[in-house]
Image: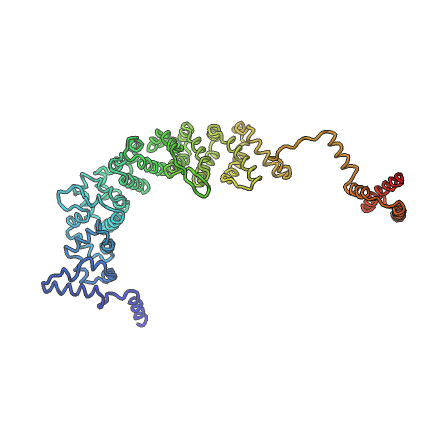
């Protein structure tokens, strides 16, 4: 019993429920009293005041009946639905609270919407008149209200799907102008979600009868504007990734050809957006073909008719404006080109010989290598391109040979890699390609061992790189002279003199001679020193009669004796 009381106390502390002393409680109580007395309620309680109350959701959580009665009144329910699609700038809180109330787990208010489903859904979607075919509210949806409408429709589809599907399928405005749904990307994606639009469902049947896919594809003509193209692209991508029952309509070769022709049409009023979105969509289509194939699938075959256009997008534009950052002046690569690279990567990953042949034929790899060296600080681009070339290296050797020959990759990489190594040794500056060049160097060493590819590596640039790398490991001292200026060659006589000096005149001897010639000692002192040295030598010879070799110290002393004796003779001659 004590445990139960404790749990009750804990629950009360978390959410104590409606407070009788709160402003909302008093306001609803005064409103109920005014209604019972037949008084004017305009200044007593308004929907805006209720929605702005901080504890309105707590009241709803406890199913506070006065609040439920107030919200489900016809006028207030209409305002709730209108706030989902529009509101004054100062009343955004009312729109957000209206969405939370309609999507709340306590469905009292939501149930009231479907008491008269057609009328209330007309209010929600902005059809004020029965004969109205175009909704101005859907046209004017901003991002926030589009998201709120998506949440409400998703909740309605979960709890009252039949009512909503029946409304869409019978509404003349959506029958004749289904493109109105493009005003809200989230709404359209919710409708094609396989949780609601599954095979055999009423929603799928309605969309199939409406030719929904054709409506989305026709959007790429650009007549409906940039937001509509973006919405259609997102919806088609969801259909592909979720394996929608509408997907067979999209995977038709005729439909894909029409889609690409409209998007790449030079007269398209939204050409830039249409191209970018269709390239993204093509990438999703290719990745949907998950298994390797030997022939090009029908659904992606039309893509290869536009490879030249894709290459033109990938190549740098002449009017590109450089941007300046901490690394200097750079030419921006852009997301548009990155989408092309991702598409090529997806095509190559299918490991289809027919696709590889098409890519080589249109010189795709040549354009990729150009971009790799042009945008040297774009690490994402370089990583993607390198992963593609690694796929090429691991594929059939004939295909690999074609790519290496077409791009002249071995010569270019070997030359640049050698220059970077020399520069790094001189200045310590690390090239942005260092990691990639190291990886390519290892790949080239492996590929050069294949007989089919030996001719590709038979070039002086590759040989020079290998020589430089080998010298760097074995003779580091000689490596310092690689980039040093050539010194003047010495004559044969000079070389002979230097050799003779090294062999016959050690450094110690020269030093002693110079000192003795500068200041010669007296003859008496010199002779006495010589006699003492001779006595020491005699004693050492007696002690070392049995040994054949003399210590190094004795040799040094002998060497020092020689100049002393010579200086003594010179002094006597001069005297």
Q: Quadrant of residue 511?
A: top right
Farthest residue, direction left: 38
Position of 172 with respect to 9 (left or right) is left
Position of 103 with respect to 482 (left or right) is left
> Can you say whether 328 is above or below 75 in the image?
above
Closest to the observer: 359 or 514?
Answer: 514
Closest to the observer: 378 or 246?
Answer: 378
Q: Position of residue 145 (x, y in %)?
A: 25, 49
Count of numbered tags = 0
Q: Quadrant of residue 33?
A: bottom left
Q: Quadrant of the C terminus?
A: top right
Q: Quadrant of residue 276?
A: top left
Q: Position of residue 415 (x, y in %)?
A: 53, 32
Q: Position of residue 303 (x, y in %)?
A: 35, 32
Residue name at image x 76 percent, y 41 percent:
507
Q: Can residue 72 be seen in the rendering of this structure?
A: yes
Q: How is the image coloured?
A: rainbow
Closest to the observer: 330 or 571?
Answer: 571
Q: Can residue 545 be seen in the rendering of this structure?
A: no
Position of 489 with respect to 32 (left or right) is right
Residue name at image x 85 percent, y 45 percent:
521
Farthest residue, direction front: 575
Residue name at image x 75 percent, y 34 percent:
499
Q: Quadrant of the N terminus?
A: bottom left
Q: Position of residue 394 (x, y in %)?
A: 48, 35
> Can you say whether 251 is above or below 2 in the image?
above
């Amino acid at each position: 019993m004590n445990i139960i009381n404790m749990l009750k106390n804990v629950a009360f502390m978390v959410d104590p429920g409606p407070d009788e002393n709160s402003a909302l409680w008093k306001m609803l109580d005064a409103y109920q009293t005014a209604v019972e007395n037949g008084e004017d309620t305009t200044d007593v309680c308004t929907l805006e005041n209720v929605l702005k109350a901080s504890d309105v959701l707590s009241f709803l959580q406890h199913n506070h009946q006065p609040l439920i009665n107030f919200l489900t009144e016809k006028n207030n329910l209409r305002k709730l639905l209108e706030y989902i699609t529009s509101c004054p700038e100062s009343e955004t809180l009312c729109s957000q609270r209206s969405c939370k109330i309609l999507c709340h787990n306590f469905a009292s208010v939501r149930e009231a919407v479907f008491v008269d489903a057609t009328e209330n859904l007309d209010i929600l979607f902005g059809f004020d008149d029965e004969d109205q075919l175009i909704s101005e509210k859907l046209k004017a949806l901003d991002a926030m209200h589009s998201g709120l409408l998506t949440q409400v429709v998703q909740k309605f589809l979960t709890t009252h799907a039949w009512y909503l599907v029946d409304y869409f399928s019978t509404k003349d405005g959506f029958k004749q102008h289904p493109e109105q749904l493009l005003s809200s990307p989230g709404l359209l994606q919710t409708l094609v979600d396989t949780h609601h639009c599954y095979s055999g469902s009423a929603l799928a049947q309605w969309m199939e009868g409406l030719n929904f896919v054709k409506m989305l594809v026709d959007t790429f003509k650009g007549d409906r504007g940039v937001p509509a193209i973006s919405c259609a692209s997102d919806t088609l991508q969801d259909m592909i990734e979720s394996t929608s029952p509408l997907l067979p309509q999209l995977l038709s070769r005729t439909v894909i050809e029409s889609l690409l022709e409209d998007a790449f049409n030079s007269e398209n009023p939204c050409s830039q957006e249409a191209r970018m979105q269709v390239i993204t969509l093509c990438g999703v289509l290719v990745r949907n073909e998950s298994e390797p194939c030997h022939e090009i699938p029908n659904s992606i075959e039309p893509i290869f008719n536009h490879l030249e256009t894709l290459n033109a997008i990938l190549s740098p534009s002449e009017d590109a404006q450089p941007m300046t950052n901490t690394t200097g002046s750079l030419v921006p690569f852009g997301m548009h080109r990155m989408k092309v690279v991702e598409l090529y990567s997806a095509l190559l990953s299918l490991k289809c010989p027919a696709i590889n042949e098409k890519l080589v034929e249109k010189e795709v790899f040549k354009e990729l290598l150009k971009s790799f060296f042009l945008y040297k600080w774009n690490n994402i681009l370089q990583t993607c391109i390198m992963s593609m070339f690694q796929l090429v290296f691991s594929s059939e050797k004939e295909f690999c040979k074609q790519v290496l020959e077409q791009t002249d990759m071995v010569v270019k990489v070997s030359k640049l890699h050698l220059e970077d190594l020399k520069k790094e040794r001189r200045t310590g500056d690390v090239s942005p390609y260092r990691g990639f060049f190291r990886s390519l160097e290892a790949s080239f060493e492996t590929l050069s061992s294949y007989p089919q590819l030996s001719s590709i590596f038979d070039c002086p640039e590759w040989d020079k790189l290998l020589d430089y790398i080998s010298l760097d490991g074995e003779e580091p001292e000689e490596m310092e002279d690689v980039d040093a200026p050539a010194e003047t060659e010495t004559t044969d006589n000079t070389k002979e003199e230097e050799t003779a000096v090294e062999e016959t005149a050690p450094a110690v001897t020269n030093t002693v001679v110079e000192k003795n010639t500068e200041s010669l000692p007296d003859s008496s002192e010199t002779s006495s020193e010589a006699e003492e040295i001779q006595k020491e030598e005699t004693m050492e010879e007696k002690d070392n009669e049995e040994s054949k070799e003399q210590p190094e110290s004795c040799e040094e002393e002998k060497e020092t004796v020689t100049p002393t004796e010579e200086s003594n003779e010179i002094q006597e001659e001069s005297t």
